[in-house]
Image (cartoon, rainbow, N blue to C red):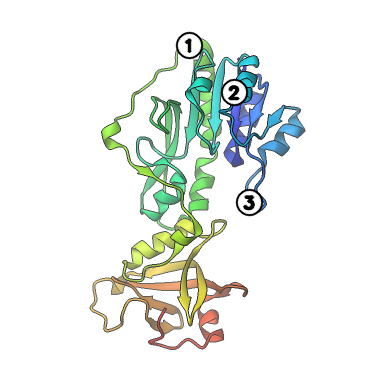
Amino acid sequence: MRAVLFAYHDVGCRAIERLIRLKVEIPAVFTHAEDQEENHWFGSVEKLCRERNIPAYTPQSVNLPEWIQKIKSLNPDILFSFYYRSLICKEILDLAPLGAYNLHGSLLPKYRGRVPINWAVINGETESGMTLHAMVEKADAGDIVSQKKVKIDLTDTAHDLFLKLLPLTDLILSETIPQFIAGTLARTPQNHALATVYGRRCPEDGRIDWTKSAQEIYNLVRGVTHPYPGSFTHYNGKKVYIWQAVTEEHNANEISHYLPGQVVSCLPLTVQCGKGQLVILRSQSEEEEDYTGSSWAKTHQVSIGSQF
């Protein structure tokens, strides 16, 4: 089997290694050039391809005529997309006789679109998974060919969830590649009525709204903490990142005379929310080091009643 890949990130690296073990021929990989503005906490597909002597290309768009012709000349039996960030045109999707398939980090049809892992944690989901599906013109809408689930624990960050999902890459490919070769792979249409779609997040989306419940804010904190840009608030006009927190659930139903965003305790640093309270465990002002919440409060002379 000859597979042309569109791959990026750790999932792309993991998939390439697994396909090599499964004796799949990879004549070329299309990936993204490294963005120097981005925090590269994940593996480099381009570097892995150099090490494995696999031709790798980094066009800004694969949908241009010269790249369509290039892919056609590679005579792929099948196309795979693994965390590739750009949409691939129908002309390319139609080039491989066995079809084109994408590995998506959610339980489709839920969480179509960008950064599904972060959104699942932010929304307080209790399970997630990986879905291998046929690629069609509409993003993440094609038939499902394999889907595996994992549990999301209440303490999981988005990165924790990512690490739970990553091994599913191997499992799904090990199960489906023999079925692709044998022509026995079943396809299940998605129920589009159940679909949810989420967009890309930017650093500004990490702004904390203290009128929300402590649980909602806690989910935001763990959904965008390291290695992602982080949740943040402001104190005395300066941006403050909240990297780790827990909820003070026993106060969730009590009527408080404190307003949302007011400090109700400095040891531990605890902030009133729209419902319940948030205990800040790790915080950091811009251009300063990372502190425990209480140490940060002491350094910045925070007192009970202070307002975020």
Q: Identify the amino acid type marked 2.
A: Pro
Kindly indicate whether the residue at mark 1 contacts the one at mark 2 (C-beta within 8 angstroms).
no
Q: Identify the amino acid type marked 3.
A: Trp
- Which of the 4 quarters of the picture holds residue 207? bottom left
Which quadrant of the figure contains the C terminus? bottom left
Mark sitting earlier along the chain (1/3): 3
Dot 2: what SS? helix
Residue 65: mark in rendering? 2
Dot 3: what SS? loop
Q: Is residue 34 visible?
A: yes
Q: Residue at x 45, y 44 (%)?
A: 114
Kindly indicate whether the residue at mark 3 contacts the one at mark 1 (C-beta within 8 angstroms).
no
Residue 9: give x, y in percent of width and height.
Answer: 60, 41
Q: Is residue 24 visible?
A: no
Residue 90: mark in rendering? none
**Disc 2 or disc 3, which is closer to the eye?**
2
- Which of the 4 quarters of the picture holds residue 95? top right
Q: Identify the amino acid type marked 1.
A: Gly
Q: Residue at x 47, y 61 (%)?
A: 204
Dot 1: what SS? loop
- Which of the 4 quarters of the picture holds residue 26? top right
Classify 10 Å Cα crowding around label 3: few (below 14), some (14-19), many (20 and above). Answer: few
Residue 41: mark in rendering? 3
Residue 183: mark in rendering? 1
Residue 200 vs 133, above or below: the answer is below
Residue 171: give x, y in percent of width and height.
Answer: 52, 30
